[in-house]
Image (cartoon, rainbow, N blue to C red):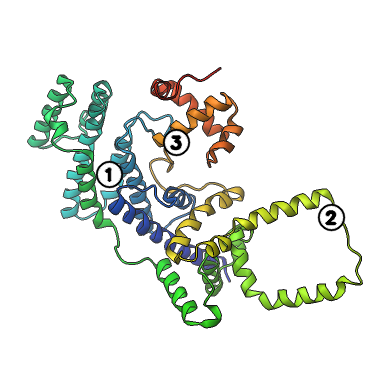
Amino acid sequence: MSTADLDEKQQTVTRWIVEYAVFVVWNDFVKHKTVDRNNNRDLIQWIAGQIITGKREIQQSYLMSLLCRLNDGRNYMIRYNEDSILTVLEDAAEVLQILIKDIKPPLYKEGQDFLKAMRQEAVYVCCRANNFDDAKEVFNRQFSSGADKGAEDKEHNKQEIQKMLKTKNPQHHLLTSHEYDDFLLKAQNFLKHFVNTGKPSLLKMAESRQDHTTADPICRDKRVNLGSLMKVCDEMGVSKESSWPNFMEQRALKEHLQQVNQEKKKQSNTNINANAASTPTKECSPKKRKHAAVDESRMDTSLASRVQENSNLNPYVILNAELPQLQTKLNEKSPTKSLPSPGKLRNPWLEAEVNEFYQAVQIFGIGNWSRIKNAMRTYRTNVQLKDKWRTILKTGEINRLKKLFGDVKK
């Protein structure tokens, strides 16, 4: 197979995963008002490390990035870039501008109205937290220097917001007349135009595979797992080694490979038993026994084991749980690739994660980032933990944490 054909196959599989990710993230956003279910952010982060060339897939990547920011928009203190002064909704406004720049006029006008509402909400979230100083800074960035010029009604809205900022009243009618959930509903009504509500290709293939195994008594006990995705690659002629790096190291594939080579393994076991009586037993060295114990512990956490323990899992849940874990393996040997966006797609620190991080620092002490990382079981690196601690001190968030959990012993 030529390099061009291989690249085309890889883009096809990546397109399926992007389509599936949008389906999952959007449904969680609509039904549960969050994107943080089922490790969705890990899946989005994995997609950010891929090379995406299709216009539709790039648009969907922007959409998922925007949904993450809308999910975090209530907390004006979250920053997607440690060096940025923009709040989450200000950052979301930049993503939205890129998303709507090439759409047709009727929808473009609706997009401009939503952009205006997002800029206003960026001010309102600061005011609801009774931080009118930050609210004024956000207002100046979003409504000055021609950022929202043109119509008289827009000028009127600016004057209304300025009057509200002068009152420094968190109970002002502009703030109490609607809540952040109302803004999310407005976002949902606009962004639905960018979402394909049909079933994604990956889900269709998983359901088809499930129907096949259920109907076949020989395959009735099989479950669709990541190996099914590998089989699709085989059928398309895509090399596992080049298209899905390090997949063979995933313990989730053990079950699939054992099923494929079941007869060979039975024959191999028979030969081993036949030669056991005439072959002297070699004692494993301590080092080898150690590695064997590690392998057994990994097998205990394999997808096959979890499926056996939870027989009610369906292909949708299994794929949704396993795909995000690929990011770690892919990043071990592959250089980071970024989507063509105004900035790198980042996973912001949620308030609950910051609280857990602060309590870990209290226990292990400042500077023991490796022990803190292991205790939190987080994917964030030691450097990221150190930078986050500096940010907590720099932004003054340390005062909130001290009130909740007390001081950190030096």
The image's mark for residue 284 is: 2
**Residue at point 39%, 30% (across, down):** 84
Residue type of the residue flagged with mark 3: Glu
Q: Are marks 3 and 2 in contact (CB under 8 Å)?
A: no
- Label 1, label 3: how many angstroms apart (C-alpha)? 30 Å
Residue 357 in the image: state x and y as whole percent. Answer: 49, 32
Can residue 218 be seen in this snapshot? yes
Nearer to us of marks 1 and 3 is: 3
The image's mark for residue 353 is: 3
Residue 223 in the image: state x and y as whole percent. Answer: 52, 70
Q: Secondary structure at mark 1?
A: helix
Residue 403 in the image: state x and y as whole percent. Answer: 39, 21
- Label 3, label 2: how many angstroms apart (C-alpha)? 43 Å
**Residue at point 40%, 61% (across, down):** 20
Residue ID for mark 1: 97
Q: Is residue 106 left or right of residue 43?
A: left
Q: Is residue 187 left or right of residue 205?
A: left
The image's mark for residue 107 is: none
Residue type of the residue flagged with mark 2: Cys
Q: Secondary structure at mark 2?
A: loop
Task: Identify the image quadrant of the N terminus.
Answer: bottom right
Q: Is residue 124 left or right of residue 347?
A: left
In-front residue for pair 168/49 = 168
Q: Quadrant of residue 141?
A: top left
